[in-house]
Image (spheres, helix red, strand yellow):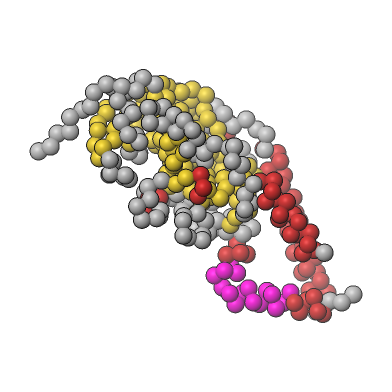
Amino acid sequence: MNTVLSRANSLFAFSLSVMAALTFGCFITTAFKDRSVPVRLHVSRIMLKNVEDFTGPREKSDLGFINFDITADLENIFDWNVKQLFLYLSAEYSTKNNALNQVVLWDKIVLRGDNPKLLLKDMKTKYFFFDDGNGLKGNRNVTLTLSWNVVPNAGILPLVTGSGHVSVPFPDTYEIMKSY
Amino acid sequence: MIVSSALMIWKGLMVITGSESPIVVVLSGSMEPAFHRGDLLFLTNRVEDPIRVGEIVVFRIEGREIPIVHRVLKIHEKQNGNIKFLTKGDNNAVDDRGLYKQGQHWLEKKDVVGRARGFVPYIGIVTILMNDYPKFKYAVLFLLGLFVLVHRE
């Protein structure tokens, strides 16, 4: 019984050290890779409304609607240590109220094994684009970029921004809400 | 000797990363499929690091002990550096406003415990087992104590 226990003990310790070494290997072989790829973004439609922010503080704020296209090939990012990519399209702009605003408009999870070529056309935003105030009206420069969070099997969690962005101006007037 | 060196390593990590808990275990499934219950996250909490959308932050809600690991969805930062932001779990359908305090719409820098920079899967499952099944915790402690007493060479 003694030898069974000591054999089980050394087997357990050995497998633990092998797994630890493999995990560290996964991490160190991919820690310094450049995870950026070129991205093509295009905005097809913008609309602006001014309504009470029903998602949060109930003040009248600017609400933007954007339709966009994304073209990107993410195939080169996936390797043995990438479990998934969390893609997010964010809009960045500055207003009188706030020097920097960033709003995530849309996101998507791409697992290893899913189709890595993105060819999305005329997509609607997933999340409401509310500003903190009325800073979208007449805003000359709202920049949209596609970024992703690389989730490894083990190791660093980098945030990478795709090269390629699009800046759009927002309209100077609000669309009237039609009520019946 | 082992206890004091473990303590030194832990405190050293706290200083290097600037966070009061540099390693956390993921407790819920709200960030699946990226993180599952039992995964380990390495955090840093350097004040100079700006909070930007897409980052995974670990934060505590005022009055609650349990830290939450979610992703930043929206930020509004003023000229003087004051920032307010909104978070959402990847696997949740809605943002975290339902989790915040009554009347609280935004999180601030002071609520942040750290930012997730690195990740190792599965290792933290022991902590979860010990929390969910206290009998298991007592059994492990009992066996460890027994081992220390019996193994005297």
- Dominant SS of magenta comes to helix
Q: Residue furthest left?
A: A180
Residue drawn at point x = 24 percent, y = 31 percent: A49
Classify B12 as above or below A105. Answer: below
Residue B125 shown left or right of residue A167 in the figure: right
Would you say residue A128 is visible in this rendering?
A: yes
Q: Is residue A81 visible to the viewer in this orientation of the structure?
A: no
Q: Is residue A108 left or right of residue A47?
A: right
Determine whether, in the image, residue A171 is placed left or right of residue B71. Answer: left
Magenta highlight range = B129-144
Residue for point 27% across, 40% down: A59
| Between B60 and B153, the one nearer to me in the picture | B60
Q: Residue at image x 52%, y 56%? A: B67
Q: Which quadrant of the figure has residue A88?
A: top left
Say which of A30 and A66 sits in front: A66
Residue B58 in the image, given as x and y percentages of width and height: 53, 50
- Residue B30 % position (x, y): 46, 53
Is residue A125 found inside the magenta-colored segment of the image? no
Snapshot quadrant of residue A112 = top right
Q: Quadrant of the N terminus of chain B?
A: bottom right
- Name the foreground residue: A135 vs A32: A135
Q: Residue furthest front?
A: B80
Q: Position of residue B105 (x, y in %)?
A: 37, 47
Query: Height in image: A60 above or below A162?
Result: below
Q: Quadrant of the C terminus of chain B?
A: bottom right
Q: Residue A77: x, y in percent?
A: 57, 33
Q: Residue at x 55, y 27 (%)?
A: A37
Question: Which residue is outermost to the right?
Answer: B153
